[in-house]
Amino acid sequence: MDFEFAYDLAVTPGKEVVFVKSDDRHRKVRVLITEASSTNETLTFSGNSLGSSVRKIKAAKKDEPPVPVTGHFGETDGVWRGSLKQL
C-alpha cells in the first residue's frame, strides 16, 4: 500500500507521525516512531501503530501490546511516498 505524509513532520524516535493512503487521503495511520534512518532520498523507520483507518494495519487498543509497523519511503518530485507494513 502506498502512503504519503499527512503533515510535514520530522520522523524521529519519540515523535508521532500521521500517514495517509496515496489513493484515499481519508485513510490514515498514526505511528509513534521508535527507530529511524535516512539518506537524502530514502527514509526507513519502525514504530507502533497508535490509530488506523486502514484495514491491513491494526491499531492497538487500550491494554493491548503495541502493533509494530515498518516503513520505507522515498522522495519523488518533492513528495515523500512509500509503504507501511504491519509486522
Image: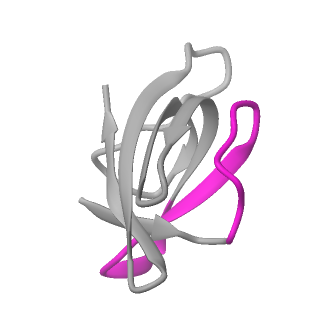
Placement of 66 over or under 58, stated as above or below: above
Q: Quadrant of the N terminus?
A: bottom left
In the image, taking residue 44 as reference, residue 37 lies left or right, namely: right
User: Which residue is farthest bottom?
Assistant: 77
Placement of 43 over or under 66, stated as above or below: below
Q: Residue 61 colored magenta?
A: no
Rendered residue at 66%/15% (across/down)? 63
Q: Quadrant of residue 3?
A: bottom left
Rendered residue at 55%/34% (across/down)? 36
The region drawn magenta spans 8-28
Query: Closer to the camera, 87 or 55?
Result: 87
Residue 14: image x %, image y %? 76, 31
Residue 5: image x %, image y %? 54, 67
User: Which residue is farthest left?
Assistant: 1
Query: Closer to the camera, 15 or 37?
Result: 37
Placement of 23 over or under 29, stated as above or below: below
In the image, taking residue 73 as reference, residue 12 lies left or right, namely: right
Residue 20: image x %, image y %? 47, 68
Q: Quadrant of residue 87?
A: top left
Rendered residue at 62%/35% (across/down)? 33
User: Which residue is farthest right?
Assistant: 14
Q: How many marks?
A: 0
Rendered residue at 36%/61% (across/down)? 74
Residue 9: image x %, image y %? 71, 61
How is the structure coloured here? Answer: one colour
Query: Closer to the camera, 27 or 84?
Result: 84
Q: Residue 19 colored magenta?
A: yes
